[in-house]
Amino acid sequence: MTDEVENKPALPEGWLAVDALDMDAQGVARRPDGKVVFIDGALPFELVSANVHRKKNNWEQGSLTQIHKESSQRVRPRCPHFGLHEGACGGCKMQHLHEGAQVAIKQRVLEDNLWHLGKVKADTVLRPIEGPTWGYRWRARFSVRHVRKKGAVLVGFHERKSRYVADIKECHVVPANVSDLLLPLRALIGSMDAIETCPQIELACGDDVIALVLRHLEPLSEGDLSKLRAFASAHPGVQWWLQPKGPDTVKLLDDDGPQLSYALPEFGITMPFRPTDFTQVNPHINRVLVSRALRLLDVQRSERVIDWFCGLGNFTLPLATRAGEVLGIEGSESLVARSRENYAKNAASRTGPALAPTTFAARNLFEITPEQLVKDGRAQRWLVDPPREGAFALTKALVDLHQQPGLRGDWEPPQRIVYVSCNPATLARDAGLLVHQAGYRCTFAGVVNMFPHTAHVESIAVFDLGS
């Protein structure tokens, strides 16, 4: 290895050879002395020059200034607002990289995290879950700013590495009919009395509704409410919600029109939701993800399954079409009540086989104990879908029961766990505990390209008990 490095031809002064991409979609290069340089805008296998704007003892950070040898995977960005220039939109980070290469890099990030952080290697690497790469984003949070110097209202994402709102007129990752609303929304806010006190518009698309949640810091005038209603009338499918304070204060402007929901047709399930609820950003990928998760879980009609971090029932309700019994567990009583309501609505409206008996419970899932696991009872299968923090407490409780059989009584651990992750680092940490301390092996793992053109890595992994 040393001979290979020594025999490499020296690069011209100031040139850098990029050999990887990090979690923030920055190119990673090394100076001759081994110091790491992170380069915004650079891609693997490129020779570049960079303007370094931050220096530490072991690393530097800079922006691409010139490409001397271009990657074969570099492409022309579709969006005119993407780039490294001042004012560029920060909503995407990887439009300059071929879509297939984006997925390959995310798969490498997953495998590297599993190995370096958890010392785990999956028996089988799953084929990536992919789907539409444009118009896929059915959820977004647009910042709103009245910029007096420009004499205009801006509606969009923040600029790259900036608190300023990007001056965008189109967006290719949201549905086309939503992109078409950006300029009309700017005109609307610019005409309102509340031009200075509406900092945000949150987007949540359902199958039949475009919900726009207007965050307003002061009560809206009757004139402004009339303008919102006129905007909705002029743009079919738009539904205004008002949010005066926190997410729990959101309220529909007018109590008419279709309910916000999305369907999981394979399972005959319809999921009602509120626009500030957590639901998957990409409904196309979510349908495939739910289907694959249930196939991998391989639950039988005779089996009980627990869905940890169940949310509104995105996995729980489909599981009820396959299992003998389901328990959905979430962190708040209010969310559990909503899950029960969704289950009841679907159970009442089904035309096919009845849903399996399903219960929901509230737990602090970040303080779960071995005793609580035993109390919740045996289940042959687990579905785990935690937030970015992962499922450390749950995993550690399972480890404790494995290592201290006296705590278990007649309780038995699940034979299979399907773990859906939005953070490869915490997945790797939990995988290390499951494999090295709880008696499981990682049989499958693969990426889910939920957020094309961003560096966000979603993934799915399967853990089977025994060797």
Image (spheres, rainbow, N blue to C red):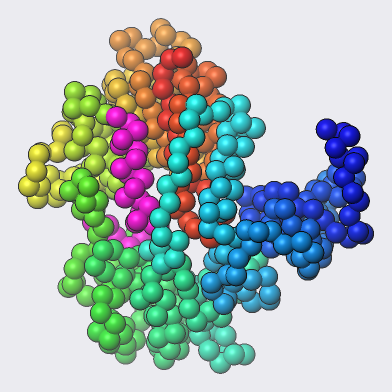
Give residue 463's position: percent from left, percent from top.
Answer: 43, 26
The residue drawn where x is 35% and y is 76% is: 177
Q: Is residue 201 left or right of residue 241?
A: right
In this rendering, does residue 34 appear at all? yes
The residue drawn where x is 21% and y is 31% is: 323
The residue drawn where x is 23% and y is 42% is: 317
Give residue 400's position: percent from left, percent from top.
Answer: 47, 17
Q: Nearer the viewer, residue 291 or 214?
A: 291
Is 80 situated above or below 374? Answer: below
Give residue 7's position: percent from left, percent from top.
Answer: 90, 41
The residue drawn where x is 51% and y is 22% is: 435
Is 309 situated above or below 203? Answer: above
Q: Nearer the viewer, residue 253 or 171?
A: 171
Q: Is residue 116 left or right of residue 403?
A: right
- Please give the range of residues in magenta: 272-298
Q: Is residue 60 left or right of residue 364?
A: right
